[in-house]
Amino acid sequence: MKLVILGGGAAGMMAAGRALELGAQVTVVEHARKTMLKLGITGKGRCNLTNDTDLSGLVKNTVHNGKFLYGAFSRFDAQKTKVFFEQRGVPLKTERGARVFPVSDRAFDIVDALRSYAKNAQIVSANAEHIAVSDGRAVGVRTDKGYIPADAVILATGGRSYAPTGSDGSGYGLAAEHGHTLIEPEPSLVPLDADRALCQPLAGLSLKNVEISLVRGGKVFFREMGELLFTHTGVSGPIVLSASVHMRGEYSRDVTAFLDLKPAIDAQTLDQRLLREIADAPNTQFSTLVPKLLPKSMTAALCDVSGISPGTKLHSLTREQRHALGKALKSFPLGQVSKRGFDEAVVTAGGLSVKQIDPKTMGSKLVENLYFAGEIMDIDGYTGGFNLQIAWSSARAAAEAACAKAGSIEERNTKMVINIALDGPSGSGKSTMAKKISDTLGFYYIDTGALYRAVGLLVRREEADPDDEAEVAKCLEKAEIRFDFSDSVQHTFLNGEDVSAKIRTPEISDYASRTSALPCVRAALLRLQQDFAKTHSVIMDGRDIGTTVLPDAQIKIFLTASAEARAERRYKELVERGEKVEYAEVLEDMKARDERDTNREISPLRRASDAIEVDTTHLDIDRTLDTLLSLIRERMDKK
């Protein structure tokens, strides 16, 4: 199945990786100098990749057409997004407002993870000029570099914000020429221009816990409390960006804004406070009162708005002046406001009408085999990671639907089940390679360690002795341990409960280590793994996969390297973690580990007689992966 994706941004590359998992041949057409330029600068270079909220939170904070994505969000939500990136080597953290960032605060860690995920896609640097349609179906793409045939096309060219990164709105016309309606694109999550004479002297001043209100035709249509920043031309900050989301269409014109500088108290309580302040220092000037209420730099502005001279004695303030001061504090006017341009917008509001797109598949209702993903659609949300979640969820929905006609992983595996056994000594890179091969070929990677951890959790809950085989065997007799996959992620179940997260503790690791040495445990889990491998294409790594676990595997590889090379890799890993070790010590440990693994009574390290040996001593990760994929594909072609 040949899939062409127009746009190599966040949505495009997520779609590319997912389609590759599902067995498609993927071509990504990108007209910028490289893929994911915008993603690399998002969040001020930190990348707020999602928001740690539930399904209803995602829908609610996707302000425009959030319900349209209910199905896509439910299939790939914030939790699955977090698991996706963490399993690809990007540790995450959650900050105020449930915003999720890489621990490194580097957006390029997210970029690198996606590039690796979509590594086997062909990237074509070209301008897409036309989506070819025949008999109502998308059949290819014409670019300025030539024609690319396709079984399906995903349009993921983004909106109009940050045009230098490639997000210039050029994709709208590609859909419009086939009848798709364009809702006028507007900048969103953008600063606002306001009364410049008022705001310019306050530029750089940040206010916390203030409330902004947007008014049109005498009616308030948006109100939110939070942090605000004055700029040379108006206002910015979190509540202003949120306000801009609601300034669409007619509500982007003739809009005035006001600030409640004391939103925690009502007007009457504020007036009582002013009376107390006046009574405490009746002979001081008005200018000395302002710093007790607001930052001192706002003195001149408050004097202008309230009409009170800074030199006015407090005891001489009239009732009307006091009320004017209260009004200035509770309804500080910013004047008529308007949105800044696309060059300052985080995202684009508007885009292709969702009325002509199937919410289940992201597919066009007008052109068969044409799909959409990300910001090109009329879908956008608040700041806080919601817009990237829109990209991830819609991209995966589009990729899965586009590949469905070619058959899912499981359907293909039912027709042709292929098992790959990858054995080798510690430090040879077999686990890393197994995961990468799984991602590339769409095979299931069985995390056997998780199964042993589940046994450890079982024994801990039953309060059995993890070293007593008879007690552990009794635990296994009355327990059900199983695993399945959701979006290529393994979930481990104990008696019907998903314990995937609960088994990742030091205590359970200790129990797993002790019970794994028991023959009854290995026998039980061996059957579980072999039963799954009978009906699914899997890749497994270990010491005895090709000799014991999958003795009938069609493809067996023994990955090796000199002890010195393996020790050098391990030494570098430990040093990067900040551990103080000596290379000689690591080498000695590596040789001792080889000796133990080769001579252990249970599950010794063995090379299957029909395994292909690959020595990685002088190969880096990329060359090793290319070598293994070539061997595997050659063997698969013969099957």
Image (cartoon, rainbow, N blue to C red):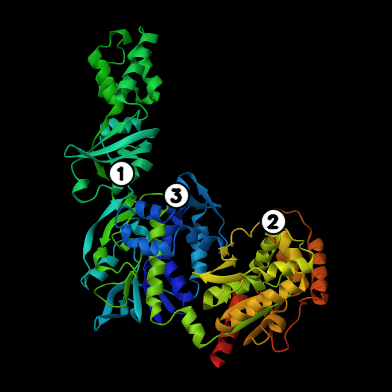
Residue, x 46% and y 71% (percent of image)? 17
Disc 3 marks a residue whose amino acid type is Lys
Element type at mark 1: helix
Residue, x 61% and y 74% (percent of image)? 434
Separation of residues labelled 1 and 2 (CA atoms): 46 Å
Near-viewer residue (4 or 60) = 60
Give the vertical position of 30 relative to 245 (above or below).
Answer: below
Q: Which of the two discs, 1 and 2, labels the residue nearer the N terminus?
A: 1
**Viewport quadrant of the C terminus:** bottom right
3 or 1: mark nearer the eye: 1
Separation of residues labelled 3 and 1 (CA atoms): 20 Å
Residue, x 36% and y 20% (percent of image)? 290
The residue carrying mark 2 is 506
Q: Which of the two discs, 3 and 2, labels the residue nearer the N terminus?
A: 3
Element type at mark 2: helix
Residue, x 68% and y 58% (percent of image)? 461
Q: Residues within 10 Å of mark 3 (few under 14, many from 20)?
A: few
Instruction: Tell me the quarter of the picture where residue 261 sits.
Output: top left
Residue 512 picture location, percent across and down? 71, 64
Q: Residues within 10 Å of mark 2 (few under 14, many from 20)?
A: few
User: Going by the image, does 142 lie left or right of 87?
Assistant: left
Per the rendering, the mark at residue 44 is 3
Instruction: Tell me the quarter of the picture where residue 336 sits.
Output: top left
Q: Which of the two discs, 3 and 1, labels the residue nearer the N terminus?
A: 3
Give the vertical position of 119 relative to 284 (above or below).
Answer: below
Give the vertical position of 57 relative to 571 (above or below).
Answer: above
Separation of residues labelled 3 and 2 (CA atoms): 36 Å
The residue carrying mark 1 is 243
Instruction: Tell me the quarter of the picture where residue 166 sits.
Output: bottom left
Residue 515 picture location, percent across and down? 74, 66
Disc 2 marks a residue whose amino acid type is Pro
Per the rendering, the mark at residue 608 is none
